[in-house]
Image: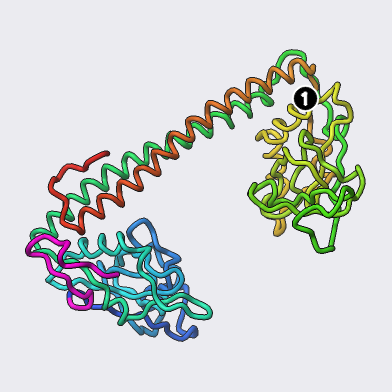
Amino acid sequence: MNVRQAQLPEGWEIKKLGEVCLVIAGQSPEGKFYNKQGKGLAFYQGKKKFGEKYIGEPTTWTTDITKEAIKDDILMSVRAPVGPINYSTEKICIGRGLAAIRASEKVDKEFVFNFLLKHESEIVGNTGAVFNSINKAQIEAIEIPVPPLPEQQRIVSILDEAFAAIAKAKANAERCLSLSKALFESYLQGVFENKGEGWEEKSLSEVCEFTQGIQRDVKLQSESQGKKQVRFLRIVDFTQGNEPPRYIDNPGDKYILNQDDVSLVRYGASTGFVCRGLDGALANNLFRVIPKSLKEVSNDFLFVFLKSPTFQNVIRASMNGAAMPAISFGMIKEIPFPVISIKEQQTIVQKLDALSTETKKLETIYEKKIEDLEELKKSVLQKAFSGELKTNKPVGV
């Protein structure tokens, strides 16, 4: 991470970080000195407790003090990942996953903090067999452009004002993004909670059949080897969407899912995820949910019902506290299912599709706004350390 002197304004100098800051490499005490009762100094091993800017509350203390950081020291993660920074809020003991950077009277600590923030992703240390790491000497060797102290303070003032405006705009965009997502979920929940006139109920097992996927231990092929082979559908094929297809010998119609059919993830982290849109044979950790009669239940209506909070909340309540989340046929077979005409089902699906389209448009707008604000923050930081910040007004917010 080198800075060229010729690119900097007059009066700026390039210094090594070790020339303007004290760098303290962390050292971990023996585990026998750790405690949870608040005895000794708060101990931080790495970046686990890092917040937006200030380190969080401790959960471990040590009575054997190895290396200390004090209030307002900049803490840097020095072992996988290398580079993230936070401020210390009190005197603490730091382990080998952290280093403390203490600004001297030559530099404003916020100036140093923002410089390290700008270059966080560029700080690369040693690549070891287990961890990527950076040592004290490498941190001290980082080059930093240093203007006169009044100029540092002016830059910090501009950055504070700009970042506050960016943070406010980002919070508004994130709130709008959350509301747009909640709008669809709220409407979907209302459809099945506020039942229409003449709605009846049957259990899910009365209107649908369940078929578990197939277990295959054979090595999967990256492409079909013949007409008798079909795509093998795993959870990642539905949840990630960009997985290369795998194929197996055709196991029979019992395990085949068509694009219009609906299936559920049976166990694991994605338990209850509703799958649709692919042709192939289901893996063992999914199962089909097939209407007994398409004249009574459409796949489209079944799909939105299974995605609704009405269904998903029952699953979550049943799995609460389970070490390995899982769905059994017995768990869902008695869940009430609304029995309405196919015409009504189509009307509901059409309304939900239209609302989904509109809310996704809004989500795209707000996601782009959040991305743009992050890029604006990077742009402001770039200008700050190249001497281009000429105003106290945050531009573009």
Q: In which quarter of the image is residue 107?
A: bottom left
Which quarter of the rendering shows the C terminus? top left
Disc 1 is placed on an element classified as strand
Q: Residue 5 versus residue 50: which sits nearer the camera? A: 5
The region drawn magenta spans: 1-19
Q: Residue 249 versus residue 236: which sits nearer the camera? A: 249
234, above or below 98, in the image: above
Does the stretch in magenta take in 10?
Answer: yes
Percent x, y for residue 341? Answer: 79, 16
Q: Residue 84 versus residue 220: which sits nearer the camera? A: 220
Residue drawn at x 38%, y 58% is: 51
Q: In which quarter of the image is residue 53?
A: bottom left
Residue drawn at x 45%, y 66% is: 48
| Residue under label 1 | 338
Can residue 284 be seen in this snapshot? no
Does the stretch in magenta take in 201?
Answer: no
Relative to residue 33, is residue 291 drawn left or right?
A: right
